[in-house]
Amino acid sequence: MTGESPAAVVMAAESGALRGIAAGQIAFLAAPTQLARDSLERLVARYGDCAVEQARVIVPLGGDGFMLETLHRFLGRDVPVYGMNCGSVGFLMNAFAEDGLPARLASAQAVQLHPLRMTAITTAGAVHEALALNEVSLLRELRQAAKIRITVDGRVRVEELICDGVLVSTPAGSTAYNLSAHGPIVPLSANLLPLTPISAFRPRRWRGALLPSAAEVLFEVLEGDKRPVAAVADSTEVRDVMSVAVQEDRSIAATVLFDPGQGLSERNIAEQFTV
């Protein structure tokens, strides 16, 4: 998830787009857990519910996985999403509370997130496209390490990366799989994309790169018949890929709402000081 500008951060608070929201203008969605379903029942009884097509705001109840599913479902539609945590970590969510929801929505700060677009070509010649709000990753399928050539903006940067995999992350996704793979956390306003190897064997000391958000990245799988590789864009997996192109798509945006002082920029910064 990328491209949070200062204007985007305060968009909802300044425009007042969600002030005066009435009962029945909120669409609640629940993850398939008992906690989320119980929370849904109480919130609907208190604030009403409406179809997502008529909603002024969508409120998913669950964890980060369900939040990502919701964002993908409504990606590109002009409706903000305000998640409330009924899961575990809840990095993309707000704290759950039944009281004062309309007031929280009215004061919420908005972040616009742009996805990565993956175009993967399989060894059979099939072309698959998918969007990723966290990361696009290439992963070895079998016991042998993958061999991958990396080209950035038409120039070969790594002739042969021998590894378990490699990923391109959005800034918002930089605290997820990218961080687990020892990639850098990127501030949302930096307009940078982390390119991070996963268990690199050769070049052994290569730790990845920070790319401009406009960069076009091409991964080419070497010896794919012997060392097959799968490509994953968030939850969409394509197996036996031959090449994978990745580029940020700024024509599409998801609007995510956060309580004041708890926005995604603050969370990304705070995560860098977590010990």
Image: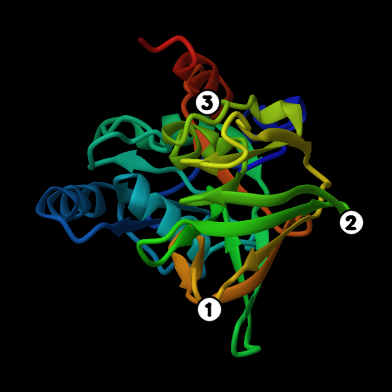
Residue 139 can be seen, yes or no: yes
Q: Give the residue pinned by disc 3.
A: 263
Q: Label 3: state its secondary structure.
A: loop
In the image: residue 168, left or right of residue 236: right
- In contact (CB < 8 Å): disc 2 and disc 3: no
Q: Is residue 273 above or below residue 186?
A: above
Eye-nearest disc, 1 or 2: 1
Mark 1 or mark 2: which comes first in sequence? 2
Measure the C-alpha gap from mark 1 to mark 3: 45 Å
- The spot of residue 80 in percent (x, y) is 55, 49
Measure the C-alpha gap from mark 2 to mark 3: 36 Å
- In contact (CB < 8 Å): disc 1 and disc 3: no
- The spot of residue 122 in percent (x, y) is 60, 81
Residue 25 can be seen, yes or no: no
**Front-most of residues 67 and 152:** 152
Residue at image x 40%, y 50%?
A: 67
Residue furthest to the right: 154
